[in-house]
Image (spheres, grey):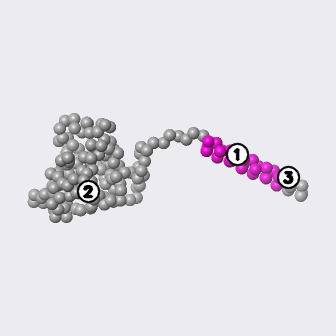
Amino acid sequence: MKTILKCMFAAFCMLSLAACKEEASSKQEAATSPQKNTTTENQGQAFIEDDESQPNVLDIAIGSKDHSTLVAAVQAAGLENSLVNAGPLMVFAPTNEAFNKLPEGTVEGLLKPENKPKLAYILKHHVTPGNYDKEFLKKFKKLGQASNQNVEVTTEGDDVFVGGAKILASIPAGNGIVHVVDKVIVPTE
């Protein structure tokens, strides 16, 4: 019986040793084999799926059929990660109809890769730090935008205009607020 136990123990040790050699060999192959080329495209906080938190300003724009042009512009400018930051952010989100009011060919031209910096600058002109509702915005005369320019805030009755764009609706977000506007706010510089 002792001989059988010794043989079984020896067989177990040999199998364990073989398994260790195989694992070490696999690790060495993985370390020396060429790595796949990874890109920076679609990386960052904007591309993490989260079904539990309150939607952020980017989620709200993506979920709106009236903001598909804005979403395409944000993606072309590579600003997705900026719009999911902790904030708080106020985004003045032009509708598709607002983009359609621009001169013919403007949007198509801005979406070209060579115009990415200009597009990013224009889009940053629609974002400001803070989380102020429409009523609170009535107290402002100017707002500083992420583009480092100020835009004028005016009121006409209950209507609030930011940079000449009328706020049509306001949607709270997990990292701020989205103010839907009827006009693209074009920077003066």
Looking at the rendering, the stretch of residues picked out in magenta corresponds to: 9-32
Q: Point out the tag, 3 or 2, that comes first from the N-terminus.
A: 3
> Mark 2 falls on what kind of element?
strand
Q: Is residue 50 left or right of residue 71?
A: right
The majority secondary structure of the magenta stretch comes to helix
Is 122 in the magenta?
no
Q: Point out the tag, 3 or 1, that comes first from the N-terminus.
A: 3
Question: Does 35 sit above or below residue 134?
Answer: above
Which residue, given by chain and number where applicable, does mark 1 sit on? 22
Question: Does 174 sit above or below residue 30?
Answer: below
Which residue, given by chain and number where applicable, does mark 2 sit on? 128
2 or 1: mark nearer the eye: 2
Is 24 in the magenta?
yes
Towards the viewer: 166 or 86: 86
Q: Position of residue 171 (x, y in %)?
A: 26, 57
Quadrant that contains the N terminus: bottom right
Mark 1 packing: few (<14 Cα in 10 Å), some, or many (20+)? few
**Residue flagged by tag 2: what amino acid is it?**
Thr
**Residue flagged by tag 1: what amino acid is it?**
Glu
Residue placed at 79% from the left, 49% from the top?
Answer: 14
> Mark 1 falls on what kind of element?
helix
Q: CA distance from mark 2 to mark 1?
A: 57 Å
Q: How many marks?
A: 3
Q: Is residue 28 left or right of residue 128?
A: right
Q: Is residue 2 visible?
A: yes
Q: Is residue 13 left or right of residue 49?
A: right
Q: Is residue 169 visible?
A: no
Circles 3 and 1, Cβ within 8 Å, touching? The answer is no
Q: Position of residue 4 (x, y in %)?
A: 87, 54
Which residue, given by chain and number where applicable, does mark 3 sit on? 7
